[in-house]
Image (spheres, coloured by chain):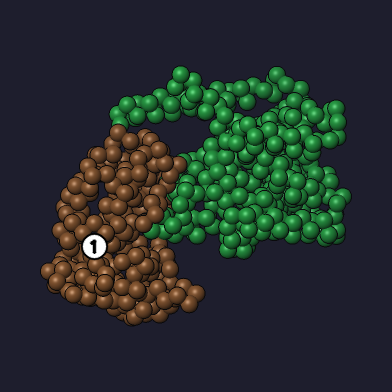
Amino acid sequence: MSALSVTDISRNFEGVQALANVSFEVAPGERRLIIGPNGAGKTTLFNILAGSYAASSGRVALFGRDITHLPAYARARLGLSRTFQITNLFFRLTVLENVLLALQAGNTTASPVLRLLRQDRALLAQADALLARWELSEHAGHAAQDISYGQQRQLDILLAMAVAPKVLLLDEPTAGLSAAEVPRVKAILRSLARDTTVLMIEHDMDVAFELADRITVLHQGRLLAEGNVEAIRNNPQVTEIYLGSD
Amino acid sequence: MRAADANSSVKSRGIAALFILTVLVLAVLPDLLSTYYLGLVIEILIFALFAMSLDLLIGYTGMASLGHAAYFGVAAYAVGLLAIKLHWSVWSALPAALIIVAAVATLFGLLALRTRGSYFLMITLALSQVAWGIAFGWRSLTGGDDGLPNLPRPELAAHWSLAGDRPFYFFILLLEGAGVLLLTRLATSPFGFALRGIRESETRMQALGYDVWRYKFAAFIVAAVFAGLAGALYAYYNRFVSPDYLGVFRSAEVLLMVILGGAGTLIGPAIGAAVIVLLENLVSAYTERWLIVIGTIYILVALFAPNGIIGFIRDFRARRAKS
């Protein structure tokens, strides 16, 4: 069974066809790269998968379960997690509190009522470990709005990963990072266990080709090509849209 | 982390000491103050809880309501009507009033939570005006703008009346204290934590798996019930209920208490409530133009202390720590 199966997804924005009849399947544990020039519909696709936008038509299934009409939070509870292209954090809360909110969402150790009323001390240790891994420990007490942009981008990914997702949507995970930060994020993504399926939009082709198993190419809202890294590299159509026809 | 832990335990011990001190002071006040000043303390206690309940919406969840007096007033009318017309005792009238408030908040919440931002502000105002309109217009039940006079002071048991100022003060103090403790506990629980997350980013909360609407709905009802507790006690204190309890001025006043003290801090709105109640009583001894004073305070706060008294103190301490 596919981890994610997308069937005939279309989306119109007031007459503009952002996505047209896009279909593809992602196998469990796969690292799937989504590429395409600006305006290809990559982020729109992510927003439809995550439930931020509704599709105009088509169907999305997560491990065989139809999630087309589920709201974003219900999809998240089924194990679908995402990062945001425009950094989306709890900016006036501390870095530690950001992580704790993410961990609290996935916490199922007590009854729902008890979970709402009593802070679980175990989460604090978990949060400390995560922050150490991302080298953010020294900023634990700082407001998320006060750390560097690169650190905010990393915190955004950290939050998406903290809920232990089954399917992780990463929207340009290395965009905005400093040269020193990119290797760490790459290493963390590489070390992600194979029980998490990853879909990634990425413009840095070094990062992208290194991590990807298969690549889906979108162009003007349509699925242009799909295949392994080698096949896409050698696809003349893909070369053409990236390098230009003239 | 360890330093932070130690720091927070010192801080929580400080808060515990402050709390015990406050309780002690409040306990001896009836021996020190005249009836008039004891009345002021009661009013401060009541409005502190009222303002704190609104803070759960504004400061924690980021929902600015301009109709919070509706719940204060509905509970006041509920205890008033149950006590006067049906002769219910405080132990049945008070819980019944809170249930009625929760029901009204459920209905109003279902309507108001379809909107956000300034639209939420407008619809909460409109809904509270509906409640005001009913209180004002349904004369046979509510007495219209004459209100409900002669609400008896509550009696605990047949031979133990709270008619005296001193027992009544302790009755209020006990219920207020319980309300404040419960509200504070809720605000600092994972539930309150999630509300702060919603204030910062609803979309991120949803992406993490939080059912944001349900949290907001729960916060709306909880805030209304605590406002209702304050309103019911105010009715017992004044022994009178009128449409003013539900009016837009009451809503604006409690909003000002929250903003003046500092939204999102709970203690701030309590301080804001104390300042407004004291000023109101002080000023009204000299002039009836209380609205001008309130307007001036609002402008001064907006200009010089946009984060309220608590925010002003925090900024001041941060600046001193830096230099």
Q: Nearer the viewer, residue B177 or A125?
A: A125
Using the rendered image of the protein, determine whether residue B152 is visible from the camera's viewpoint. yes
Q: Dot 1: what SS?
A: strand
The residue lying toward the viewer, choosing from A90 and B269, is A90
Label 1: which residue? Answer: A198
Q: In the image, what residue type sits under mark 1?
A: Val
Residue drawn at x 17%, y 71% as measured from the top left: A232
From the image, state the color of chain A: brown
Residue at screen point 28% across, 39% down: A136
- The chain letter of the green chain reads B
Q: Nearer the viewer, residue A168 or B228?
A: A168
Foreground residue, A211 or B149? A211
Q: Does residue A6 show up?
A: no
Q: In this view, does B247 lie above or below B51?
A: below
* Residue located 70% across and 47% down the image: B251
Q: Which quadrant of the figure contains the N terminus of chain B? A: top left
Residue shown at the point (22%, 75%) measured from the top left = A237
Crowding at dot 1, Cα within 10 Å, few <14 / some 14-19 / many 20+, comes out as many
- In the displayed structure, would residue B301 be above or below residue B255? above
Q: Outermost residue, front direction?
A: A246
State the residue lying farthest toward the left.
A230
Measured along the vertical axis of the image, is residue B173 above or below residue A208? above
Determine which quarter of the picture holds residue B288.
top right
Where is residue A242? Give x, y as percent: 25, 67
* Figure quadrant of residue B160: top right
